[in-house]
Amino acid sequence: MSLSLLLMGGSIYFSSMHLAEKQALGLLLEQQEDYSDEITSVLKNSKSNLLTFAEIPAVEATLRTNQDGGIEPVSTEGAKVCASGLNQVVRAFLANYPNYLSLTLLNAEGKVLAGALHLAADQEVMRLADKAVYYSDIKHQQADGLPILTVSTPIYINGQVEGVAVAEISALPLLNSAIEKRKGIDTYIIDNKGKFWVGPNEITDFSAYFLANERQQNEYVLINDKRNSVLAVHKILFDEQNPQRYWGVIHELPKSVVFKHLDQARDSMIITGLMIVLLAVFFASMLVSRIIINPIVRLVEGCRAVGDRNFSVRLDETSVDDEFKELFQAFNEYTEQSEVILKEMKKQADSSAKSLENVVVHMEDALIMMDEFGTIKSCNPAVIDLFGYDEKEMVGNNINLLIPELFKEEHEKSDADYKGTGASKGIEHNGEVVGRRKSGSVFPMGLSINEYRVNEEQHFIGIFRDITVRKAMELEIQQTDERLKKQYNSYLSLSDFVRRASTNFEEACNKILQECAEVLQADWVGLWLFNNKRDALLCQNYYSGREKSYFTLPSLLVSEHEYYFSELLMEGGLLSNETTPLLSHFPEQAHSPVSTLQLPVTKYKSIAGVFNVVNQDEARVLRSDEAQYVKSLSMLVEVLLEEESRRRVQEQLKETNKELALASQMKSQFLSNMSHELRTPLNAIIGFSELLKGGVLGPLTEEQSQYSKEIFDSGSHLLDLINGILDLSKIEAGKEQLALDEVSIQSLLQSTVYMLRDKANARGISITEEVEEKVTVCLLDERKTKQIVINLLSNAVKFTPKGGSIVISATIDKVLHPDFRLDDSELAQCETPYLKLSVSDTGIGISEENIGKLFRRFEQIDGSLAREFEGTGLGLSLVKAMTELHGGFATVVSTLGEGSTFSVYLPYKKVDLETDYLV
């Protein structure tokens, strides 16, 4: 019965408490509504004002001015005029709304176009839709600590975000109204991140409590037992774009005020019910203690032991029954499994720790662990090797122990910046720093710092690496690069000098020696050249880098130093620190050089001399790249040698040409003078022998007739020979001129064939003429052209056996002159029309190796043919000379035993019969 009374009293009590609590909380929410509406109204007004500002024409004009290069496209006003007008609007707006601290217009890149702004525009606003508004969190100004609210909206022009309107509103009026007491109600304002803005009391603990009990409703009530108060919470959703951003307006009343009357009724009921309960509890506890409480107490003790990571605890399963027995069994199984897992995890952790320790111990880089103040906590053995301190000397000291005083301030500032940003800059984020060893010596090192935390405490790991070798290599690379650039520029300069001074061999060589000594900082640089007999090496010149002067040395006999020259040729050059034969006449101090370089100078693939570089300074040992530079200079000397040889050959050729020209002139003068003296007696001999042969002077015996015929034939042959020689001499002397005239090709060929037809018929040889229809009249020297055809046709008749045939033809062909380069694309387009006169026979033919002997003076291709076929050997020479005099050329195609075809190509020029113009 007592239990029933207890249950009924409790039910009545809790029902009454719930009803009273609901009424009290409803009153709180009603009182809170006015203040929340006030804040909401201010936010709506700020949105309306900002959107109105964004839509005024001056804003759009300013943005278009910024977009179109400083000129407003509609009114053509400048940027300053638009900005000035907009600034007047802003000042008027701020005067009417004193709670607005600033009103600013930014372009799409965040640049201020008008107004003034304490804070930069939030980049989130650039992603909002048109007419949307972004509210920032309330922030304090840095200057006076005034709480401000930043409101911004994007401005769209032609569908693109071209700017942002930003207003800063003082939040002080909103917050001050919350401080006022409202019938014993304390009001607080807190944002969704838990940041406390205003309230009458310190609410650090309350803020955490509020965030922990955050709900999805916009209005709800909480009972804060810790503060013994009742809280009415109302969310103000000021950001339409993000419902997760809001302000919490909280009204707090003491519980004693809210539940004043309820507590009085509760106290009476508690006293009455307590008496009944005490009696019921006394009897029930005796029973419950044995069945329920004792097992629970033991279970709690076991759980506490497990909480203290004591998994070896076990509960006595035989001391309980039913559900508690199953519970004890489950507890014991859990602790057994946990104990096994814990042991395995500890084993793995020990193994991992040992592996990590081995890695740290055997790291080549120095590793130092320090706290947030730079105090060294531990280090690996590499630190001891790098800095020379033992571990006891390092631990407890500041990291500045390893940094020289000169660099301490710089490193402290760098580390402070790093720790402040919290962003790792990666390996050597502090750059290349300078470390100091225990001995006091400094050295370059690379540094990497990384942060880690232990129990929310900040620690750092520093990794140091000695980069002395790397820095030395970088310096060596830099010096090598500078040397190569210097050598390259020197080579270019010398190349240009050699090209300009190639006619002065000695001057160019001296310039090369001096430049080499200055670039390599060499003590002596010399050039040796072989004499013409190549039995001695002559000193061309030496340049002293020390004394800045030139000097020469005695020559060396090649026979006395054959081993040296053979080794020099075999190796292609010698780089050593030994005395060489080239130094045998040097001053005494040069007999023990630090380094010498001898490179052969070649000419037409054979050695012509030696280029020698000598250094006595130990700091200037010759390097391989410098040897390559000297090699390039030796090649310049080779160019000079070739130029010198070419110059000498050219001088010799000039002298030879002068002598040949003089001889040719004397020959032409002789032939010219002898022309009359030779022809006059020959004509007399031919004339009288012809009279004798014809019987004009009386009858002759048969023997006399034969003699007179031989005299006539021999005289005619000699006259032809002299005429040919004289014609060639005139052509070569440039005294033979063309007498161009209109020549009928058909008539010319017929008259020529007629002259030789009797001779051909006597041997049974047929002659055929073939002339193209378009070949009519051409401008030629008729006498010389006829002589060309006669010579070709005479040869054909002479070398064609009895019963053979000859074809003489005339055609027009467009061909390229053989003197032109066939690979020249422009010349290949310049084919010229030629008159082609060809004589083909079925004679003995010519072999390929003998074709090259044609067109030479006084020469036949075979001595046996000269005995069988009489001739002067001038026929084809005259053909070639007269053809070239016309500007043409001659060709031959022949097959031994089958026949030959000789062709001449004469420029085809003709006169239009109607216009009389040259075509």
Image (spheres, rainbow, N blue to C red):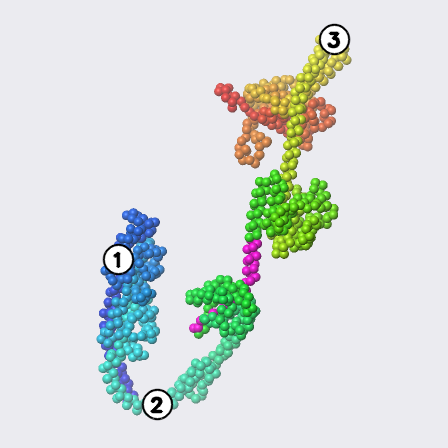
Along the horizontal axis of the image, is 432 left or right of 598? left
Residue located 63% across and 37% down the image: 647
Most foreground residue, 2 or 78: 78
Question: What percent of the width, then of the height, locates residue 819?
Answer: 59, 31
Disc 2: which residue: 285
Tag 2: amino acid? Ser
Q: Do callouts 3 and 2 mark residues in contact (Cβ within 8 Å)?
A: no
Tag 1: amino acid? Arg
Residue located 53% across and 74% down the image: 392
- Label at residue 277: none
- Helix, strand or loop under label 2: helix
* Placement of the N terminus among the 4 image quadrants: bottom left
Most foreground residue, 587 or 165: 587
Task: Give, as a single range, the part of the protein colored magenta.
Answer: 456-481
Label whose residue precedes the other's in the sequence (3 or 2)? 2
Disc 3: which residue: 699
Q: Is residue 614 magenta?
A: no
Instruction: Mark 1 vs mark 3: give the one in front.
Output: 1
Q: Could you tell me how far apart the alpha carbons at marks 3 and 2 are, in whole angstroms?
A: 193 Å
Q: Residues within 10 Å of mark 3 (few under 14, many from 20)?
A: few
Label whose residue precedes the other's in the sequence (1 or 3)? 1
Most foreground residue, 100 or 434: 434
Instruction: Mark 2 vs mark 1: give the one in front.
Output: 1
Residue 879 visible in this rendered orientation of the protein: no
- Helix, strand or loop under label 1: helix
Disc 1: which residue: 91
Label whose residue precedes the other's in the sequence (2 or 1)? 1
